[in-house]
Image (tube, helix red, strand yellow):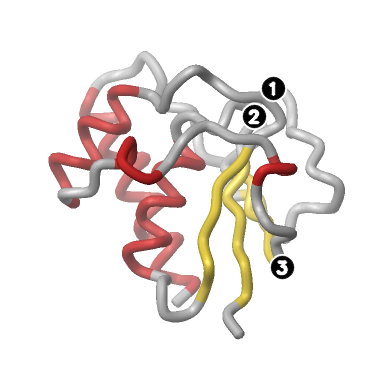
């Protein structure tokens, strides 16, 4: 049985959604992959959707949506995307905090750097 891994940030609209998409791409044989937050947004960050689709051909809006921890199965591993202002409370300690800066509202170049960093960290989990 595969372990469940959850990528978590406050709004579950950008970094954690990117990590879920890339986790499903690169870790599907090892983990069941989810993302969640302590709050939700109406939709996934549109820059994240656009860039992940352009780089990987993945349309995150087809199978992903902003959700809270109670909407996913109990994870075995929880990874925080980075607590800049506040960490979401998820009911247990984080197994790891990736400390990624939120790219929301920043340039495509910066967004792509964060996406690349997420890919590298995910590949280390393989």
Where disc 2 sits, the SS reads: loop
Query: What's the distance in space between the residues labelled 2 and 1, CA to CA?
Result: 9 Å
| Quadrant location, the C terminus | bottom left
Residue at the spot x=51%, y=42% of the render? 16
Label whose residue precedes the other's in the sequence (1 or 3): 3
* Residue 20 to residue 42: above or below: below
Badge number at residue 10: 2
Left or right: residue 56 compared with residue 101 = left
Label whose residue precedes the other's in the sequence (2 or 3): 2
Which residue, as the protein is rendered here, is positioned at the far bottom?
1
Which residue, as the protein is rendered here, is positioned at the far top?
105
Query: Hey, which quadrant is residue 8 in on the image?
Result: top right
* Residue 15 to residue 107: above or below: below
Query: What's the distance in space between the residues labelled 2 and 3, CA to CA?
Result: 19 Å
| Quadrant location, the N terminus | bottom right
Q: Are marks 2 and 1 in contact (CB under 8 Å)?
A: yes
Q: Where is residue 79 in the image (x, y as percent from the top left)?
A: 63, 54
Label whose residue precedes the other's in the sequence (2 or 1): 2
Query: What's the distance in space between the residues labelled 1 and 3, CA to CA?
Result: 25 Å
Q: Where is residue 107 in the image (x, y as percent from the top left)?
A: 26, 20
Q: Nearer the viewer, residue 79 or 46?
A: 46
Q: Where is residue 42 in the image (x, y as percent from the top left)?
A: 49, 17
* Residue 18 to residue 27: above or below: above
Question: Which residue is the site of mark 1?
Answer: 85
* Residue 38 to residue 119: above or below: above
Badge 1: how crowded within 10 Å, few (<14), some, or many (20+)?
few
Question: Which residue is the site of mark 3?
Answer: 76
């Amino acid at each position: 049985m595969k372990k469940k891994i959850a990528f978590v940030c406050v709004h579950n609209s950008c970094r954690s959604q990117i990590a879920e998409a890339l986790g499903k791409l690169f870790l599907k044989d090892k983990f069941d992959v989810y993302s969640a937050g302590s709050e939700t947004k109406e939709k996934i960050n549109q820059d994240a959707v656009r860039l992940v689709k352009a780089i990987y051909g993945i349309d995150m809006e087809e199978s992903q949506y902003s959700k809270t921890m109670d909407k996913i199965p109990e994870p075995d591993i929880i990874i925080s995307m980075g607590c800049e202002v506040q960490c979401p409370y998820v009911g247990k300690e984080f197994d790891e905090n990736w400390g990624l800066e939120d790219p929301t509202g920043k340039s495509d170049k910066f967004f792509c750097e964060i996406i690349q960093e997420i890919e590298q960290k995910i590949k280390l989990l393989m």
